[in-house]
Structure formats: structure tokens, C-alpha cells
Image: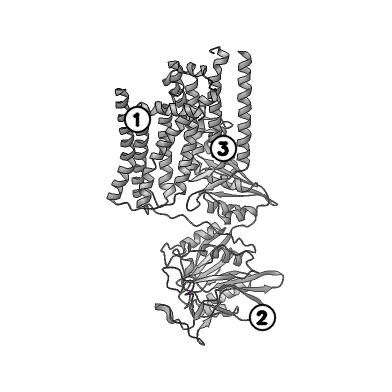
Amino acid sequence: MRRAVVLLVVQTATLLAILACVLFLAVRNPSRLDLTPERSFTLSPYTRDVLERLKAPVDITVFYSSQEGAIRRAMSDLLTLYRDASPRVRLHMLDLDRSPGAAERLGVSDYNVAVVEAPRESGVRRTQIDLVNEDNVTAALLEVAGMPTLTAYFVGGHGERDIRNTDDRLGAGEAARALAAEGFRVERLTGAAGIPADADLVVLAGATRDLRPPEVDALAAWVKDGGHLLVFADPGTPPSIDGLLRRFGVELGNDLVVDDQARLFGTDGLAARIAYLNQQLVPREPAAEALLPLAQSLRLADVPGMRSEYLAVTGEQTWADVDKRTGGGVAPFRPGVDRRGPLPVGAVVTVERGDAPPGRLVVLGDADFMTNLHLSVLGNRDLLGLLASLTARDELVTAPRRRPAAEGVFSGLALTAREARIVFWVAVAGPALLFALGGLVAVRRGARA
Amino acid sequence: MTVAWRICRRELASLFGGSLAWVLAAVFTLLCGYFFWADLAFFVLFGGSNLPAGLWRYVFLDFRLVALLVVPLLTMRLLAEERKLGTLELLWTLPVRDRDVLAGKFAAAAIVYVTMLAATLAGPLALWSLHPFALGPVLAGYTGMLLLGLAFIAVGLAASAITENQVVAAMLAYGVLVFSWFATWNEAALPDAVAPILVFCSLFDRFYGFAQGVIDVRDVTYLLAVTVLFAFLAHRALGARAWRGTI
């Protein structure tokens, strides 16, 4: 008897040890199949790219509430993806109520807050995330990993795309959120005559009214003093902005790019895809081409002390409607009048300043690609992040960003009353009745037997 | 035909010859169907636009509870009744190994469970025929339900192997499964060193990924490991007669 008990204990312990080893191997080699249509539980290539840039361990400490299990689980699920993707990420999940010391050390007093820390030469760099989602965590990692937050000012007051506006076609609120996820602190600047001292990037996005001469002078002087200016210029851009760009050797075509060959179903053939990016400036091609709804071409002219390069070019099948006849539908190409593609639609101008950091101007011949309606189309979100980084940073992350999940309270599933009845009878009543009937038959047979 | 398969067929005939399997299947499908329909109604009105997060997650978390309710009732009689009626002793006089008995009983319970689970597909299929949707999350959810059900059956089988009282067997299985569920409800009550281990070991926490549309090798491994562990314990419980001197 005693020998049998010992044998049982040994056998059970052996099996437990084997199962523990198998589990350990599974935990050490995490692999998952994300079957959600939007790959909601898979990190975006952009985040993975950022994680690959981590050179030192990063600690992510989350303070959760033990009473809010669903939120804790969502945060844990997300941050576990980061930990699994990079051995440099260390994750600490702490109950705020039970960890007052750690909370005080990290300056946290609210539930569901994360703190990202990384050692730097000047001490530990630390940033707090109040809303734990992939955009914010990746932006925090970018910051602590050596790409500090930059301040981007969107100029307003001349009909530009407004970062506060949530309107689909006019607003650029989504663009502001996308840039925030890239490590930019986005602010609005009324008028461009006085550029704040903390500006790392100034964006002039689709102005429809002229800038005053002092504003043009201020922007030009700012770039020449080492500032970073990003200009999105739709066809029909006001002359003052055209004049500003000419000072840097960028001439707007004031035409309309037609891309009928690559037209998407439901579009009018004017939306042009960016087929090529300058590989010297962008070594790694983005995964998806950007789509510019209404774009104009541009040309570069030599200006002493400045180095200019084309950045983005449309495909060979595109052409430039030089007098913009195609507003109401695509007109035929006119040989000798219209210009054949590929057409340059983006350019970078670097203002040399000797040993001082150079000024930089990046121009794109389209502004409506960054509206709330168009930002999630194809590679537009990636293009915005790429242009902002190219203008204000020296380092580029070109991997695709996560597309925001569709929002809204009401579902896209419109079930009619008749359909709901069908589902009810098939799902609820049908199988149960069948099994109940089977049970009755079995019981009656049993009774007869 | 192997011995285990013969035992499985005999068990299936016994289960479906009486009312138990039919009643359990009817209750299982009725509850699952109702939860599916209610979750669908909620999703259509307020669920947002994300079908996996707004519908399937809730559907499979509800199915999980129905499985918790029904599976111990399915497994309680597997060995306990044989032991009570004395047919287990009769079985031992035949050239039948314990593992054949267990494999046959386990397979029979698994077939009944899979049949019940397959019947719950009627709702998603009806919805798909009306409004086609991405099938990936549904596949993940049913994979999780299958693995979770096998683990439940193994727990139930082990409970049924150590007693001749069916109610006691069911309660033992409920005890293990419900503890696995409740243990992580209030982590604040757990010591820091224990909480992460219990969270990892909770059958229900390991199911959560499947409900969200993700098949994680860690979850699959854990659920299979639990199944193997309890199947082994059931095997040892059957083998205990040798050192108790029963035979």
C-alpha cells in the first residue's frame, strides 16, 4: 500500500514535471494565430519596427484596479504582445491599491495608467500613458528609445485643414491623432507671423487664402534659420504660398494629376497614387501606396545654398491636365499640351547652414489626403507619418501603422425583424426541439423495451 | 474494432438510450442558442461595429458557462454508475485494460459534447447565410470551446473515477472547475506570488483568447495539459483498486 502511494506520487510528479516543461517551452516560444479580420491582437509592423530600435531594456509598469478585470485584461493582452515581440521590454502589472510605494515613486495616482521607463545617459527617462492603447504605448517607446517628442504646429487662419475639426472632408483631427502616435505634440497656431520657440515642425496644410507678407517672410526666415516646414498644397494654392515655395526652388504646377489607369472603384480617376518614393530619402518602401485625391505636380529649380530632391512621383500612366479641365470628369489627354507622367508630386529642400543643423522644407502637391475621410485610405496614414518624420527628424520609420478600428455605437449589421425571427428559430428553438424530440423517442422506446 | 471503441459505442448507446444525453443536449443547445440570440440582439442595437469584439466574444464567454453547467452532469455517471452497479468489477474480469475503459468513456463523452457543440453552429450559420461575416473569430471560438470541453470532460472523468455516487462526482467536478473560474475573480485577495500563477492556471482565463478570435499556442498547450493531467489522475484512480485489494 505504502509503496503504491509512493509510486503514485512519483508518477504524478513526473507527469507534472513533463507538462510543466512543455508549458515552459510554449511560454518561451509564444506563437499565436490572430483570426480577427482586422488583426486586432497583432502588433502593427510600425510598432514592431519601433521595438527593433530599442537598444536598452524598457520597463512598462501598469497600475490596474483589481475591480476592473476587463480593463486589466485588455491592457495585459496588449502589453504582453510587446513583451513577446521584444526581449528588451519588461512588463510589470501592479494593483494600484496594493502598490502605493511603486505608484508614488512613479508619480501615479490613477488606475489603468502605464509608465514607460528606459535608462539614458542623463538618467532614467520616463513617460506616462493615461490611455493604454497601441498608438500611445508605441509613441512612448519611441520617446524613451531616443526619439523624443517633437512639437508640431499646424498653421490656421487661411482655410487650412483644421486639426480640431472632426468633419470627414474638411477636418484633420484624425491626422493630429496619427501624428501624436508618432511622437508629435500637435498644436494649432493662428497665423504664421510669430512661430513659437518650441516649434520643431510647422505644418501648412491646404491653405485656401493668401498668407500676409509678414507671415510668408516669417516662415521663409524660419526655414533658413534651421526650422522644419511641411507644406501640403492642393491645386489652386494661393499665390502667396506659391511665392514662398519659389524662394526655395519649388514651383507648383497648378495643374491636376489624372490617374485614370489606376482608378479605384467608385472614384473619378483623378485620385493619383504615389508610385515611387526617392530611395535615397526613404530606403524602405512603405507597404501600401498613398492615394492623393486631388493632386498637382511640382518642379524643382536650383537655388544657391539649397539642395533639393524629388521625393514622390506618380506612375507612368498618369498625366497632368495643365489647365484643370477635368473638374467635372476625366477629359482626354491632349498631346503637346498636357504632360505625361511620371509626375513629381513631392519634394524635399534642405537649406545648408554650414556646421549648424540645416533647415528643411518638404512639399506635397496635395492636402486632402490627410482629411479624416482619406487618412485611412491605402497608405495615406503611413505617408503622413513619413513626411512629418522626414521633415522634423533624421530617422524614419516607414513600416505600416495600425489602422484605427471602425468606431460608432451602432453596428453595421442591420438585421430586419424577419431575419431576427429566422435566427431565433434556427438558433434557439430548432436544435433544442430536435434533441427534446430525440429524448422523447428514446424514453418511449425504453418504456416499451 | 478496438476495445476502447467498443466501450465507447456501448457508452454512447447507454447515453442516448436513456433521457440524460438528450436532455443535456436540449438544455445545452437551448441555452447556447438563447445566449447567441440575445447577444446578437444587443450587438445589433448597441454593439458597435466590431463583430468579433461586440458579438463573438460575448457569445463564446456565454457558451463557456453553459459548458461548465452541463459537462459535469454528462460525465458524472461515466464511471461512478458502473462502480455503483458493480459493472465496473465485471469489466475488470474481462481482458480489458484500464486505459481502454477510460479512452472509451472519454471518447463517448467527447462525441456527445461535440455533437451538442456542433448543434450550436446553427445560429452562426443562419446569420452567415443572411449577412456573411469573417469566419476566423468563430473558428477560434469553437476551437477554444472544443479544447475547454475536453479539459472539462477529463476533470469530470477523474471525479467520476473516485466515487460511486454520481452527485458527489458532479460536485467534485464543479468544485474543481468553479474554483478555477472564481480563483481569479478577486486578485486583490490573493498573495502577490500566487496571483499570476492562478491567473495563468485558470481554465477560463486561458479560454479568453479564443473568445477574442486568437488561437495562442500557450492556451492550446495549457488546455491539453489539463486534459492529460486529469485523464492520468482518472487512470490512477481506477488503478487504485489494485492497492486497495479490490481485485
At label 3, which amino acid type do we have? Thr
User: Which residue occupies the extreme right position in the image?
Assistant: A355
Q: Are marks 3 and 1 in contact (CB under 8 Å)?
A: no
Q: Position of residue A393 (x, y in %)?
A: 62, 63
Residue shown at the point (34%, 38%) measured from the top left: A431
Left or right of A393 in this view: B51: left
Q: CA distance from mark 2 to mark 1?
A: 89 Å
Q: Chain of mark 3?
A: B
What residue would you read off at disc 1? B23
Q: Are marks 2 and 1 on the same chain?
A: no
Q: Type of residue at label 2?
A: Pro
Horizontal arrangement in the rendering, residue B198 relative to residue A57 (left or right): left
Location of residue A415 in the rendering, given as x and y in whole percent from the top left corner:
32, 51
Residue B219: % across, % down: 54, 39
Image coords of residue A390 (percent x, y):
61, 66
Per the picture, the main secondary structure of the magenta-coloured stretch is loop
Q: Which residue is located at x 50 percent, y 87 percent?
A: A337
Is A210 one of the magenta-colored residues? no
Q: Earlier in the sequence, mark 3 or mark 1?
A: 1
What residue sits 50% from the left and 32% below the top? B151
Q: Residue furthest bottom?
A: A336
Task: Tell me the magenta residue range.
Answer: A259-265
Residue A363's label in the rendered image is none
Q: How many marks?
A: 3
**Residue type marked 1:** Val
| B21 vs A377, nearest the viewer | B21
Q: Nearer the viewer, residue A174 or A196?
A: A174
The dot on residue B221 is 3
Reading the image, the residue beneath label 2 is: A304
